[in-house]
Image (cartoon, rainbow, N blue to C red):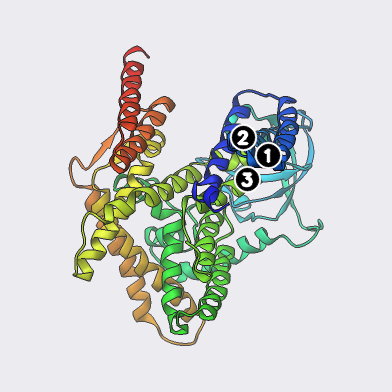
């Protein structure tokens, strides 16, 4: 079993599961998925027979059956999710009672709300005014509208079944409807709104508040196009959404605060028993978004391994986290840009960073810290570069310099903001802390804007197809394997992959 685990079996299972999702997304193979799943069960059972166990040539049976089961399970789960997003209601004008499920999204003239209607999820667009802007998640509305089925594939993959435009006088808030029990996500969003109101009192500047709210609470609705472009052009856009970077910083701060426990077994378990609930409480305060939960799962696996002296972070750990997230919601997670970028970055850090770090070692702790941070940033950028160029059509050349500036500034801001919110509740004059918070945010934004103004620091208008992304990713993986293993086999595969992409570019 140890040998199997060392061979990254969980990562391989996840890859087969992903393959099943992609196949179902392009071809509906039902009921073949059922037959394949049924067939895999006796294959797995036969692999445990004593006669088969003793025969080395049949060692592949268990793995084949397990991978086949994952492949068929992905197809079944994906098909069920796809069917659930097929609109079952009317397409005529009628009265609906809907519940707002998430924060509104600002459009040029309307507000877009994600709502639950008759057991399905839909989008409604309401003209922006003083009444509609006051609507909150968990509110019930009575609307007079005509829903149309969702024709766009990316909305269906997110579980959106239909859309409707609701004119100004065709909706009203329903205050007397029973909310039918406690909803943890609604409670989390309510707590986040309270914290945002306190944060707005701490940070009066609109631009600084928008960045501070994004860094601390994952609230990105107030970020304008200029701020987003500044962060994207400098390679710091990952900082605006709560990710593994934020949790690593917060985990490091908490670990330092509780380091006095010592390092014996009971102390490690006690320390993680305090840190991990605090991290999940932070998840609650941020509104429990999918990307935040994803990062919390990863850091929790790290903490669990640290407590019991397991190797805390391996490709198998990443495989386990990805597998269960995809099991819960195949389409919405797999085709989410944040999901793809975060796992690409983590895999690149795990596989590439250890080799980069070994290239140089300094006795000076400051220089060593800068080198390690540069290695991590370079590894993550290599892992996410194909996807970043595909989705955002640009590549920042100064990403390394940006991260050397942005990551320490993010750590400072994440230390200052919670303390300022806590002291705001106390009857003390903490003007100095408020000044420090505001100045840190201003310096952070100003520094990135200066980097954005550097000429020729950004390659833009990049146009890549899906085939290009796959080929570039294969180039990076095969080149890494060639350097690590030094086998002619990987050189041949790399050469074939480069030839394939050249012919594809010529004849497409």
Compared to residue 3, the image places residue 194 above or below, namely below
- Mark 1 lies on residue: 47
Say what secondary structure mark 3 lies in: strand
Compared to residue 483, the image places residue 350 above or below, namely below
- Which of marks 1 and 3 precedes in the sequence? 1
- Mark 3 lies on residue: 113
- Which of marks 1 and 2 precedes in the sequence? 1
Q: Is residue 166 visible?
A: no
Which residue is at a point 23% across and 47% down the rendered structure image?
398
Q: Which mark is residue 399?
A: none
Query: Could you say which quadrant of the image residue 438 lies in?
Result: bottom left
- Which of marks 2 and 3 precedes in the sequence? 2
Question: Spatial distance from mark 2 to mark 1, Cα to Cα?
Answer: 8 Å
Residue 17 in picture, x, y percent from top left: 60, 38
Dot 2 and dot 1 residues touching (CB under 8 Å): yes
Location of the C terminus (image quadrant): top left
- Mark 2 lies on residue: 58
């Amino acid at each position: 079993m140890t040998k199997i685990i060392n061979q990254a079996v969980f990562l391989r299972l996840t890859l087969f599961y992903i393959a099943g999702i992609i196949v179902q997304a392009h071809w509906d193979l039902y009921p073949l998925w059922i037959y394949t799943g049924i067939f895999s069960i006796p294959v797995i059972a036969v692999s445990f027979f004593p006669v088969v166990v003793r025969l080395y040539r049949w060692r592949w049976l268990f793995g084949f059956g397990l991978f086949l089961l994952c492949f068929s399970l992905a197809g079944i789960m994906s098909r069920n999710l796809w069917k659930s997003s097929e609109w079952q209601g009317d397409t005529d004008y009628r009265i609906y009672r809907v519940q707002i499920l998430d924060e509104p999204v600002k459009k040029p003239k309307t507000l877009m709300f994600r709502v639950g209607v008759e057991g399905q999820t839909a989008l409604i667009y309401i003209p922006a005014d003083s009444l509609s802007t006051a609507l909150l998640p968990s509110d019930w509305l009575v609307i007079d509208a005509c829903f149309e089925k969702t024709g766009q594939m990316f909305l269906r993959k997110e579980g959106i079944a239909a859309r409707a435009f609701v004119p100004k006088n065709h909706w009203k808030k329903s205050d007397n409807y029973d909310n039918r029990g406690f909803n943890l996500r609604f409670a989390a969003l309510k707590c986040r709104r309270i914290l945002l109101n306190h944060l707005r009192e701490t940070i009066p500047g609109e631009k600084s508040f928008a960045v501070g709210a994004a860094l601390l609470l994952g609230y990105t609705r107030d970020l304008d196009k200029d701020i987003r472009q500044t962060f994207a052009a400098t390679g710091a856009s990952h900082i605006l959404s709560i990710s593994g970077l934020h949790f690593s910083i917060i985990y490091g701060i908490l670990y330092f605060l509780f380091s006095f426990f010592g390092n014996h077994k009971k102390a490690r378990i006690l320390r993680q028993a305090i840190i991990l609930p605090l991290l999940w409480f932070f998840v609650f305060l941020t509104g429990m978004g999918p990307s935040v939960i994803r990062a919390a799962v990863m850091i929790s696996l790290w903490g669990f391994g640290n407590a019991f002296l397991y190797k805390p972070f391996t490709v198998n750990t990443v495989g386990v986290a990805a597998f269960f997230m995809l099991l819960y919601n195949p389409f919405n997670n797999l085709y989410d840009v944040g999901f793809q970028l975060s796992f690409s970055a983590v895999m690149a850090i795990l596989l590439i960073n250890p080799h980069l770090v070994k290239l140089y070692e300094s006795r000076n702790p400051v220089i060593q810290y800068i080198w390690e941070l540069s290695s991590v940033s370079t590894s993550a950028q290599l892992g996410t570069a194909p996807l970043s160029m595909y989705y955002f059509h640009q590549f920042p050349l100064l990403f390394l310099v940006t991260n050397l500036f942005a990551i320490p500034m993010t750590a400072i801001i994440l230390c200052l903001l919670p303390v300022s919110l806590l002291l705001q509740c106390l009857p003390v004059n903490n003007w100095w802390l408020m000044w420090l918070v505001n100045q840190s945010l201003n310096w952070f934004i100003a520094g990135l804007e200066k980097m954005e103004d550097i000429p020729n620091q950004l390659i833009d208008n990049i146009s890549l197809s899906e085939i290009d992304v796959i080929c570039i990713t294969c180039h990076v993986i095969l080149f890494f394997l060639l350097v690590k293993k030094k086998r002619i086999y990987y050189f041949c595969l790399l050469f074939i992959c480069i030839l394939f992409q050249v012919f594809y570019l010529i004849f497409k």
